[in-house]
Amino acid sequence: MAEVSWYRFDNSSTLSHAGSEGGVTVFDEEHPLGARITFERDTHTAPFAITCGIYGWMMHTRFIGLEREACSQYDLMRSALSVLLDRASESDDGGQQVLMDGVSAFVETYP
């Protein structure tokens, strides 16, 4: 598996602005294989929100009350998305089955 780096979404233009959950965007990153993950603080629903998606496959948001937990979960989710995207990109069938199974497992792991 090749290590692929995440990069700042839209050259960091979204940072410090309202995110999809009404909070302030702290981190907003995109993966070159087609995913995005965003970390917000002070959302309408909870102190922290992590929203992530794999383009064309899923969008998923988690609400977390504690900053330490939210930061830890952001890192874990980002890593898990990387692994899933790498596995899908290496699949012989174009990654369809890997993504179908992987998205379900991801949402179960990070409810």
Image (tube, grey):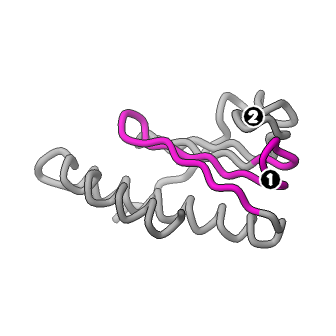
Q: Where residue 76 appears, x then y in whole percent?
A: 58, 68
Please state which of the two labelled residues, at mark 1 or mark 2, is closer to the viewer: 1
For the stretch drawn in magenta, the main secondary structure is strand
Circle 1 packing at 10 Å, graded few (<14), some (14-19), many (20+), is some
In the image: residue 86, left or right of residue 14: left
Q: Amino acid at mark 2?
A: Gly
Point out the stretch of residues depicted in magenta: 40-64
Q: Amino acid at mark 1?
A: Ala
Compare residues 102 and 75 and report the one nearer the observer: 102
Q: Tag 2 or tag 1, which sits nearer the N-term?
A: 2
Residue plotted at (75% across, 34% down):
19
Magenta segment includes 5: no
Q: Secondary structure at mark 2?
A: loop
Q: What is the number of the mark on residue 19? A: 2
Residue plotted at (71% across, 30% down):
11
Residue plotted at (37% across, 33% down):
56
Q: Secondary structure at mark 1?
A: loop
Q: What is the number of the mark on residue 26? A: none
Q: Where residue 43 appears, x then y in whole percent?
A: 82, 44
Residue furthest to the left: 92
Q: Which residue is mark 1?
A: 46
Residue plotted at (75% across, 71% down):
69
Measure the C-alpha gap from mark 1 to mark 2.
13 Å
Magenta segment includes 47: yes
| Dot 1 and dot 2 residues touching (CB under 8 Å) | no
* Image quadrant containing the N terminus: bottom left
In the image: residue 100, left or right of residue 56: left
Q: Where residue 49 appears, x then y in whole percent?
A: 72, 51
Q: Is residue 72 above or below residue 92?
A: below
